[in-house]
Image (cartoon, rainbow, N blue to C red):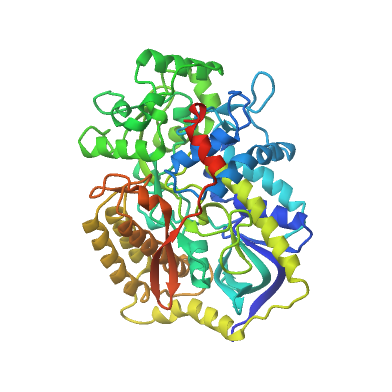
Amino acid sequence: MANYEVHEHDVLVIGAGGAGLRAAIEASAQGVNVGLVCKSLLGKAHTVMAEGGVAAALANVDEQDDWKVHFVDTMNGGKGMNNWRMAQLHAQEAPERVRELERWGAVFDRTKEGKILQRAFGGHKYKRLCHVGDRTGLEMIRTLQDQGIHRGFNVYMECAVTKLLKDGDRISGAFGYYREDGRYVLFKAKAIVLATGGVGKAFTVTSNSWEYTADGQALAYDAGADLIDMEFVQFHPTGMVWPPGVRGILVTEGVRGEGGILTNSEKKRFMRDYLPESTKSEFSVDDEESKRWVEAAIAGQKTDAKRPPELSTRDNVARAIYTEVKEGRGSPHGGVFLDISYQDAARVRKKLPSMYHQFKDLADVDITAGPMEVGPTMHYIMGGIRVEADTQQTRVPGLFAAGECSGGMHGANRLGGNSLSDLIVFGRLAGLGAAEYVKGLGNNALAINNDHIEAAIKEMDEPFEIGKQADAKNPYDIQKELNQIMSTYVGIFRNEEDLTTGIAKLKNLKEQVKKAGVKGSKVFNPGWHMCRDLTNMMIASEAIAHSALSRKESRGAHSRLDFTELDPELAKFNTSISKDGDAMKLEKTAKPVMPEELKELFAKKETK
């Protein structure tokens, strides 16, 4: 049997983004022994790419704001598919989690009175996003990392976990390897928190970083947890479209929050035409009123003017841009124009420094002098591992999940800025839940089956054996085909014919994944890493496609051309995906019922 390192912890956190770091900090604060595993280097998490702000009802700019309005906005944005308790906890706890970041050293932009400044974002009734220019995620990771390293927990960098281990039905550890040289490593742990992020690398155009290969979703699925609502995939309306090498890189919603306008090739502000009837009254369609709103935003003042149509929800804006391009009114490189150059150049550089340098350095475009070209990019998955709201525990004892890899909080569509507050609210609850679970076990020892370790090693060694065969497949060719299938048949707009075709193609591709092989050694071998990543991405892709086919309606980010209306009955059920032997089982499971006192919030005029 191959040699491997052994490390033992009470709680093992897999993923070192905002959720993972916050979970590790909380578990450590509860007095248990914590280990933190990250696929990349510490501080390089995808959270740093979250730019616009962290949503929390501090009411520093709009005094009318409170957690109840934030809760209603989140539920409305998610089209009622949210786990109501998660949305409630999120809205209630986000302000304290932001103030906690401030106490830990986060440097937020300020109002004239010295309070944390807040900006507007799509779907939020009030200015709610606390920000650090357009580098909010970076500041959050800097703060959490600085706080975390003083806790004294062990960090295992450039380490990938490939298998969760169980003693009976309980989690007892995890097996993985170091990406640098292929050394195997065994972690003995009483509880595991998954905080591995999303699934974006299964799509051709994505804002997600290379780490987002559905690792946590696949690990949980294999361990017996279920995945919910995987059909809800958010395409951010504004990613870069030119040059090709940077296609998909995020253009923060903060550009529109600071007054950026969207126009087509005919110089028309097309978003006016795509406002849903149910929300038209919330947005300005008058140039003068829109101008008043922008002037107030620039001056940092309150206003009674309605928001511009560009601040509609992400699903709506993404579909609008897609339609404009498809109908021939797009920009030269297949997007539309996002323009903030009518504002003072110094203000734009101050408010949006990352965007200024991103376009200047990567596309040779000065956003203070002319428009950007933008288009939809796969950005976020609302579905994920099913968890209990208050503890973040899955149905597998000892297995917890937080952040993008978990499901339920955002429903059918996530509001901008809710992702960062999601990380710190539920990262903390997951760390607390894991620590309390460990303490509840007492001195009960958990065993690890050596046969399971040998099987995990064999699985990782297999691509080298396959690579010796004449019919071995290049893993990168398989990933490219997976990207094409998902983007073509399971993209922004869906129908039964495309989804059925996509599922059939995924089934055929699954056989190709089994033939993915590599040559050489385990040292610095990215092809070997991709062989493992393909297995994870295939699980997520199949879950997304099957779930999308089963949901015969259009809701939030899930748009069916053959079922264009909402079906009220389908809001009562989650789409659940679980492992049944070698097969993938799909069920419709009843959603938790919201209490009457929370339902009453939706009837109040001020929170409509």
Query: Residue 564: image x %, image y %?
Result: 26, 45
Query: Residue 498: image x %, image y %?
Result: 24, 57
Query: Residue 129: image x %, image y %?
Result: 56, 32
**Residue under the point 39% across and 81% down:** 468
Given residues 94 and 355, the one toward you in this image is 94
Q: Quadrant of residue 151?
A: bottom right
* Left or right, 249 with reference to 322: right
**Residue under the point 36% across and 72% down:** 513
Q: Quadrant of residue 199?
A: bottom left
Q: Quadrant of residue 578?
A: bottom left
Query: Residue 202: image x %, image y %?
Result: 39, 58
Position of residue 4 relative to residue 251, above or below, is below
Residue 23 in view here: yes
Given residues 264 and 392, the one toward you in this image is 392
Residue 135 in view here: no
**Residue under the point 63% across and 78% down:** 4
Residue at the outermost front position = 596
Position of residue 442 relative to residue 237, above or below, is below
Position of residue 224 relative to residue 486, above or below, is below
* Left or right, 11 with reference to 264: right
**Residue under the point 34% across and 20% down:** 285
Disc tally is: 0
Quarter of the rendering occupied by the N terminus: bottom right
Position of residue 27 relative to residue 425, above or below, is below
